[in-house]
Amino acid sequence: MTFRSKLELLAAIPHIKDAPKKEAIIENLCFRPERNQRSFPKFLELTPNEGIKGDRWLNSPWLKLSNGGPDPGIQVSILSTRVWNAVKFGPDAIHPGDTFMSDFDTSEENCPAGTILSAGTAKLKVSGIFNEGCVKWKVRYGVDAKNWITLAENKPLRLRGLLCSVVSAGQIRNGDLLKKLS
């Protein structure tokens, strides 16, 4: 397996920073009912209480509140398609499992914590939780790709994805718009 090199990844940063700031198309929807299970539906239903209906977030989240419940700040993950294109290395690259991808600027500067986004008919609130990636990211895309997302100068870009909570129920479909509202 050939992974992207550190130099290739660093060279992608200017292009990633140049992503649209206000709106972009939603693509590559991913549904995760259980660990290591994925499907790619035509639409997803989102609610504030359940996150993505049927998603594993409700019963087995990677981040929990002090009371043991799932942290709502990780209900939805949005990966920049520019980041995806930078790390993937062929047509058979494994989808990273983010709720969806979009050619959208996911940086802290463009979408600070508290920013409201519309995604299809749902509304999302950007959380302040940093997604540093998991061991699966390193295995699938390489050590350089894992280190790249956690470099101090890259952390504000949120290369591993923008994490959000659902604040207003709705549906998202491939082809819907992701829009920054505030």
Image (cartoon, rainbow, N blue to C red):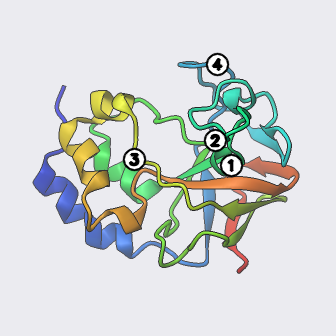
Q: Nearer the viewer, mark 2 or mark 1?
A: 2
- Left or right of 25: which side holds 5? left
Q: CA distance from mark 3 to mark 1?
A: 26 Å
Quadrant of the rendered image containing residue 145: top left
Eyeballing the image, is 102 above or below 32? below
Residue visible at 66% across and 31% down?
31
Asked whether the beta carbons under mark 2 and mark 1 sit within 8 Å of each other, the answer is yes
Q: CA distance from mark 2 to mark 3?
A: 21 Å
Eyeballing the image, is 54 above or below 174? above
State the quadrant of the N terminus.
Answer: top left
Residue carrying label 2 = 29
- Left or right of 11: which side holds 69? right
Q: Which mark is residue 34?
A: 4
- Tag 2, which secondary structure? loop
Residue carrying label 1 = 174
**First in residue order: circle 1 vs circle 4:** 4
Does the image show residue 19? yes
Q: Position of residue 12 (x, y in %)?
A: 25, 62
Quadrant of the rendered image containing residue 179: bottom right
Residue carrying label 3 = 132
Residue visible at 40% across and 41% down?
133
Q: CA distance from mark 2 to mark 1?
A: 6 Å
